[in-house]
Image (tube, rainbow, N blue to C red):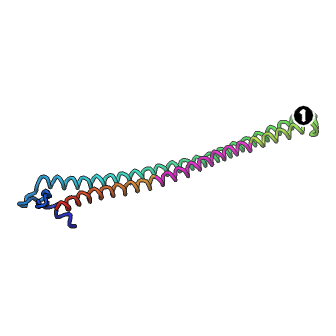
Amino acid sequence: MPFLIPLLVGTAATTGGAAATAGIIGAAGAVTAAGVLGAVGVAGAIGAGVTAAKAAGFSGDLQGKLAEREAKRLELEAVQRRKAGKAAVDIEKDQLRRNIETLRARRAAAGVQSAGTPLLFELEAVRIGTLDAIQTGANIEIGAQQAESAAELARIRGRAAKEEGKLRAGTSLFRTAGSVGTFAANRFLAA
């Protein structure tokens, strides 16, 4: 690491006109203010770069965890929608069965036979009730599938956020390394 020598002790002026630079350790072995400030600047840049990298990584991980939590909530919502839908369909079917039984009982009490118009009314009631139950079940399933799709999308967003955090962390570290390398190269070239 030859760039550390000029950083520590500085450089001398040359006959070609290059100015002397101050290192941390001055000519008489004493610590110089300019050298200390330069070293502090480098250490600060490194610290800021590492802190930014950690923050980016933490942010990505946090967003990933939040997205996973949202995905689990949406999956639970899908399960609950299916249970509620099954219960609603069962209630509709039960209500349909009771209505048909009531129609048959009233028809029998009135002495009407099970042929012709009364039978057609019963068949129409069964058809409408069955279609209502099917429609209710389909609507519930659509809602459950939407919740599952949203859960998968939340997971994808979470994975993307984690990867973006890693990328931002790496970018921050590369920028810091580049800044420190440029500083050191300038000090070395001035030697």
Q: Residue at x 23, y 60 (%)?
A: 185
Q: Residue at x 87, y 36 (%)?
A: 121
| Residue 18 screen position, x and y as percent | 14, 58
Taking the magenta stretch, the answer to whether it contains residue 3 is no
| Residue 144 screen position, x and y as percent | 62, 47
Using the rendered view, name the quadrant where residue 124 is placed.
Answer: top right
Q: Give amino acid for label 1.
A: Ala
Split into 4 quadrants, where in the image is the C terminus? bottom left
The vertical placement of 56 against 1, above or below, is above
In the figure, is residue 72 to the left or right of 168? Answer: right
Residue extending farthest to the front is: 16
Q: Name the residue under label 1.
A: 109
| Residue 42 screen position, x and y as percent | 22, 55
Q: What span is colored magenta in the figure?
A: 133-160
| Nearer the observer, 112 or 151 | 151
Regarding mark 1 in the picture, which secondary structure is present there?
Answer: helix
The vertical placement of 10 against 134, above or below, is below
Would residue 22 be visible to someone looking at this image?
no
In the figure, is residue 178 to the left or right of 160? Answer: left
Q: Residue at x 52, y 50 (%)?
A: 154
Residue extending farthest to the left is: 28
Taking the magenta stretch, the answer to whether it contains residue 155 is yes
SS majority, magenta: helix
In the figure, is residue 48 to the left or right of 157? Answer: left
